[in-house]
Structure formats: structure tokens, C-alpha cells
Amino acid sequence: MKKFFIFIVPSALFIIQMLFSLPQVASWLGITALQTQLIIVFVIVSLFIINQIWSVYLPFRRFHVFDRTKLSLLDKEFDDLSEKYRETGFDLRANVMLVKRTFLIRKEPKPKNPNKNKLSFLAKRFYFFWASSNMQYHEDRNLHLTVNQGVCGEAYRDGGIKTADLTVEAPATYNLCQKQLEQTKSVKFVLSCPICEMNYESFRLKDKPIGVVNFDSRSEGSEVLINNHDYLRDLTSRIQAFSNLCSQII
């Protein structure tokens, strides 16, 4: 029914108005008087405005309100999730990074030398959609990465969950430049999970990633969360559920 009012009614009103504006049609219908034509125009325009308000503006307003609550929903979901880890002494952080293609020239580090850069055209890069409140004043809050960099880049490209113990693995192996290495030097581990696009007709996830969820921590000893099998299994299930939530609301 909504499709009828959104697509059919405006088109029908437009066609009717066009037909009534033709002198031959107006003469055939006996509505040549200016006053009658003005009344018809007023009625058609009024119906069009009412239809647009009901079928377009009001749904858009409700969607806009929901769109503004997305971040609050993620805040609440993560606060409930991270409480368990705060009790064990680990300050878990999280962020959601979405992918977009930039048409500007991007500088990426050369794989074998992070101090030298190479030029990249039309590169896909991550941008922060949301970050947990405990990341707000950290130096990596505005970290700039392309999809060829970091643990998140691996998760996005491979379409699967990726982990990295940065107390053992050298961050430079993830194709980071010197500035990025400085920004992430306090991170102990990273767990990244791709966010897949939602098919809203079947309400199933597509295979195409649109971004990633990252869990990490700067707490000493927090790497145990990915090195211990039980901890990792629990954290993996939680990040997958968080990713599914993101797929539904983004």
C-alpha cells in the first residue's frame, strides 16, 4: 500500500494535471472557466502535498530520528558488553570503521619500508563511524587506514575474523607507516570482524563487507583475551554479534 502512495499517486496526479492543462481536454470536459481550472489545480496540488507529507516526509522524519539514535544504541550495547572485562581488569575498547573510496591521492607506506611512502589512486580507506567512549582521547582515535593496512584491512579483504597479539607480532608487518606505528604503539591486541551488508528483502547478510568492527585493549596483559581459548571464544562470539547489529542498523 505504501508503494502505491509513494510511486503511483504522485505520477497519477502529475498526469491528470498535465491532461487538464491541455486546451482540447479542458474544452471537452467543459472546464474552460479560469475559476474552475484554478480550483482543480488547487485540489490536485493539495492532494500531492498531503500525499508527500504522509508517504515521504513523516517516514523520513522517523528514519532521521532513528538514524540519530544509532550511535547511542552502539554505546549501550558496548557498555553492557565491556562491563564483564572491566571486572577482570581489562579496559576493552571498540570501534566501527566503514569503507569508502577516495578519489584523492593517498599516501601508503611501502611494504618493506614504512618510512617511505607510495602514491595510491582511488584507494579504499576506512573512516570511523563510531568509537567507544574510552577511545575518545587516545592518539589512535582518528587513525587513517586503507584496506591494505592493519588487522582490520586483513579482516575486510578476507571476509573473516582476524586477531593479532601486538606484544609478540611487530605492528610494522601490517603495512603501517611511522605515524600509524606511533599512534598504535600502546595497543596490546586487536580482534577485527567484517561487517557485511544486509539484504533487507530476505533479511540475510550478503557476502560483501562494508566495514569492520575492531575490539582491542591497551591494558597490560590484555593479550590473554585472544591467547586463551575460552576468552577468545567468548570474545569472538561477542564481536560477531556486535557486527550483526551493525549490519542491521548501518
Image (cartoon, grey):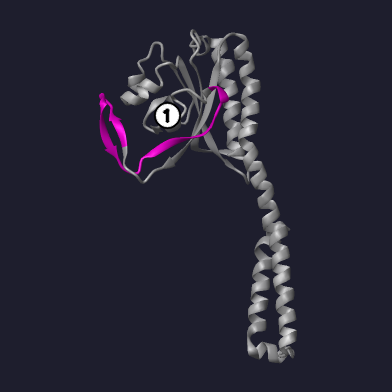
Describe residue 130's horizontal placement relative to residue 147 as left or right: right
Q: Which residue lies under the disc numbered 1?
A: 143
Q: Nearer the viewer, residue 76 or 244?
A: 76
Q: Which residues are magenta?
A: 107-134
Image quadrant where residue 10 sits: bottom right
Total numbered circles:
1
Q: Main secondary structure of the magenta part?
A: strand
Residue occupying image coordinates x 37% and y 14%: 169
Q: Is residue 216 visible?
A: yes
Give the image location of residue 51, x and y in percent. 71, 63
Q: Does residue 113 sit above or below 29 in this rendering?
A: above
Residue 226 lies, with reference to residue 77, above or below; the image says above
Task: Say which quadrant the N terminus sits in.
Answer: bottom right
Lateral position of residue 194 relative to residue 73, left or right: left
| Three-letter amino acid code at the position of disc 1 | Leu
Quadrant containing the C terminus in the rendered view: top right
Question: Is there any visible trace of residue 175 in the rendered image?
Answer: no
In the foreground, 176 or 196: 176
Dot 1 crowding, Cα within 10 Å, few <14, some 14–19, many 20+: some
Residue 137 magenta: no
Tell me residue 168's x, y (percent): 39, 11
Q: Secondary structure at mark 1?
A: loop
Image x and y of residue 194, in percent: 50, 31
Residue at (26% x, 34% y) in the render: 118
| Residue positioned 42% across, 24% down in the render | 151
On screen, residue 198 above or below 187: below
Q: Position of residue 196 (x, y in %)?
A: 53, 36
In the rendered structure, does residue 116 fall within the stretch colored magenta?
Answer: yes
